[in-house]
C-alpha cells in the first residue's frame, strides 16, 4: 500500500482501522494500518510522537520561547488517552494560546484562521506579553492601584475587549514585577546620587496610621547640575515601637548608608517633636532645621489661646448645622432667599485640629459667609414655630448657641 509521507497533513492513526479474521493465523491475512488525515489544529503547536498504546496521542510542544539572549523550543511532552484537552491546557497556561471555537470554525473558517494567526503571534512573541505585563505594573504603581483590581470583573472585561488574547498575570507574578521595578529603579537612583549629588538634605516625619502602627517617611532633596531642585522619596516604611530618639536615628542612618549618602548628607528637616529633635542631635556631621509649617502651627495655636471660648462657641454652632436636618434647612434658605449669589453647598468642614490650624480658619471663613443666611433662617423658623413644635424646639436651641454681634466682629 502506498503512503503519503507529508507529516503536516497525515499520519498513521492511533485508532487505525484493522481488518482481520479473528482466532487464527491460518487465514494468512495480516493486520494493516490505514492512513487518516487529522484535521485538529492542535498539531500546529505539537510534533507527533509514537504513542505507547493504540488510540493514544503523544507529542512535544514546538512553540518557540524567545528571550533577550536566545530562542528555544518549549519541548514539553504530553501523552493522553486520545483527547486533546491536556494539550490545549498546556498551550493556554504556558503560551497564552486559546482554543478556537468549533462553531466559529464551521460557520466562519476565515475568522478561525485569523484567530489562529493571532494566537501564534502571541505564542511566538513573548516580548509583547512582557511589555503588556510591565505596562500593567506601571499602571498599578503610578496610579497607586490595589492588586485586587486585577480580579475586578469590569477591569477584566476592559482588558479582554482591548486584547482578547492577552491573559492577565497573577498577583504573585505582579508582585515579582513590582519588586523587580523597585530594585532596578533603586540601582539607577544610587548611580544618580553618586554622579550628581555633592550635598543633600533629608526631610523626615513619623506618624501613626489607622492600624495604630508607626510609620516613617524619608525624602532626599538636592540640586542637580542644571540647578534644579530635586526631591526623591527614600523610604516610607513601618517602624517598630518604641519610637525613641535612638531608634529613629538608627533607622535614618541605615537608610543613609543604604543609599550611599553618608558623605553627602549635611542637614535634616523635622517637626518640633522632642523625639525627632533628639534624634537629629544623634546624627553626626549634620544639623537640624525645624519644619517651618509645624513651627507656624505652634505659633498660631498659642495665639488662639485667648479666644478659646469663641472657638468653642463657633464649633458648637457649626456642629448644629452638621446634622442632616439643619443642613437641609440652611441650604433651602440659600436657594430661596439668596438667589444663589451666596450659595454654599455645605458647612460641613473639618474643624480645628492640633496639626492643621488652617482647618479653624476655613471653618470660620465659611461661617462668616453663612452669617446672613443663618439670620434669615432664624426669622423663618420664628414664623413656622407657631404651628410646629419641633421647629420651635430647634429654634430655641439655635438662639442659645447663636454668636453675638461682638463675637461675629471678633471672628472677622
Image (cartoon, rainbow, N blue to C red):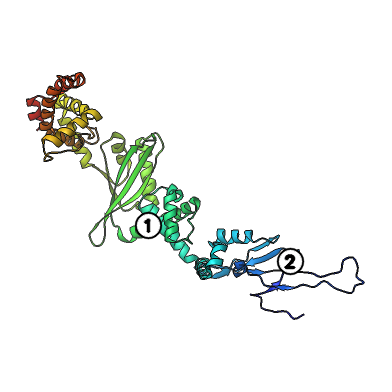
Characterize the local packing of mark 1: few (<14), some (14-19) or many (20 or more) Cα atoms within 10 angstroms: some
Q: Determine whether the residue tagged by mark 1 lies in a helix, strand or loop.
A: helix
Characterize the local packing of mark 2: few (<14), some (14-19) or many (20 or more) Cα atoms within 10 angstroms: some
Tell me residue 283's x, y (percent). 32, 43
Tell me residue 402's x, y (percent). 14, 24
Mark closer to the chain start, 2 or 1? 2
Q: Nearer the viewer, residue 388 or 315?
A: 388
| Vertical order, 165 against 321 (above or below) | below
Instruction: State the residue lying farthest toward the front.
Output: 107
Q: Which residue is mark 1?
A: 190
**Structural distance between the alpha carbons of marks 2 and 1:** 65 Å
Question: Image quadrant of residue 7?
Answer: bottom right
Left or right: 96, with 356 as reference point:
right
Q: Nearer the viewer, residue 366 or 200?
A: 366
Q: Which residue is mark 2?
A: 15
Left or right: 155, with 71 as reference point:
left
Please name the residue shown 35% across and 42% down the image.
216
**Mark 2 and 1 residues: CB-CB less than 8 Å, in contact?**
no
Q: Determine whether the residue tagged by mark 2 lies in a helix, strand or loop.
A: loop
Amino acid at each position: 500500500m502506498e503512503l503519503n509521507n507529508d507529516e503536516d497533513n497525515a499520519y498513521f492513526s492511533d485508532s487505525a482501522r484493522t481488518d482481520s479474521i479473528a482466532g487464527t493465523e491460518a487465514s494468512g491475512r495480516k493486520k494493516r494500518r490505514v492512513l487518516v488525515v487529522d484535521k485538529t489544529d492542535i498539531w500546529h503547536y505539537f510534533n507527533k510522537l509514537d504513542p505507547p498504546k493504540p488510540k493514544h496521542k503523544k507529542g512535544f510542544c514546538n512553540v518557540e520561547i524567545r528571550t533577550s539572549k536566545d530562542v528555544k523550543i518549549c519541548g514539553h511532552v504530553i501523552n493522553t488517552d486520545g483527547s486533546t484537552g491536556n494539550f490545549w491546557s498546556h498551550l493556554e497556561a504556558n503560551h497564552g494560546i486559546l482554543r478556537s471555537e468549533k462553531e466559529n470554525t464551521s460557520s466562519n473558517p476565515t475568522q478561525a484562521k485569523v484567530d489562529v494567526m493571532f494566537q501564534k503571534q502571541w505564542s511566538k512573541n513573548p516580548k509583547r506579553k512582557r511589555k503588556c505585563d510591565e505596562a500593567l505594573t506601571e499602571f498599578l504603581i503610578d496610579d497607586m492601584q490595589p492588586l485586587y483590581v486585577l480580579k475586578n470583573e469590569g477591569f477584566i472585561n476592559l482588558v479582554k475587549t482591548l486584547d482578547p488574547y492577552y491573559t492577565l498575570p497573577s498577583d504573585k507574578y505582579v508582585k515579582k514585577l513590582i519588586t523587580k521595578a523597585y530594585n532596578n529603579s533603586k540601582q539607577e537612583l544610587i548611580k544618580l546620587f553618586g554622579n550628581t549629588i555633592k550635598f543633600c538634605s533629608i526631610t523626615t516625619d513619623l506618624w501613626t496610621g489607622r492600624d495604630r502602627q508607626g510609620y516613617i517617611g524619608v525624602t532626599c532633596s538636592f540640586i542637580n547640575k542644571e540647578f534644579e531642585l530635586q526631591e526623591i522619596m527614600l523610604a516610607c516604611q513601618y517602624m517598630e515601637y518604641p519610637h525613641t530618639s535612638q531608634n529613629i536615628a538608627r533607622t535614618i542612618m541605615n537608610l543613609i548608608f543604604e543609599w550611599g549618602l553618608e558623605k553627602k548628607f549635611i542637614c535634616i528637616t523635622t517637626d518640633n517633636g522632642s523625639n525627632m529633635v533628639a534624634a537629629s542631635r544623634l546624627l553626626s556631621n549634620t544639623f537640624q532645621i525645624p519644619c517651618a509649617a509645624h513651627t507656624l502651627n505652634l505659633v498660631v495655636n498659642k495665639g488662639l489661646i485667648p479666644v478659646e471660648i469663641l472657638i468653642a462657641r463657633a464649633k458648637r454652632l457649626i456642629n448644629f448645622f452638621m446634622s442632616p436636618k439643619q443642613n437641609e434647612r440652611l441650604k433651602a434658605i440659600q436657594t430661596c432667599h439668596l438667589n444663589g449669589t451666596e450659595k454654599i453647598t455645605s458647612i460641613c468642614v473639618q474643624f480645628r485640629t492640633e496639626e492643621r490650624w488652617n482647618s479653624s480658619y476655613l471653618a470660620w471663613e465659611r461661617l462668616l459667609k453663612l452669617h446672613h443666611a443663618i439670620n434669615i433662617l432664624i426669622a423663618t423658623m420664628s414664623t413656622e414655630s407657631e404651628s410646629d413644635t419641633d421647629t420651635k424646639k430647634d429654634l430655641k436651641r439655635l438662639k442659645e448657641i447663636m454668636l453675638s454681634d461682638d463675637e461675629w466682629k471678633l471672628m472677622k
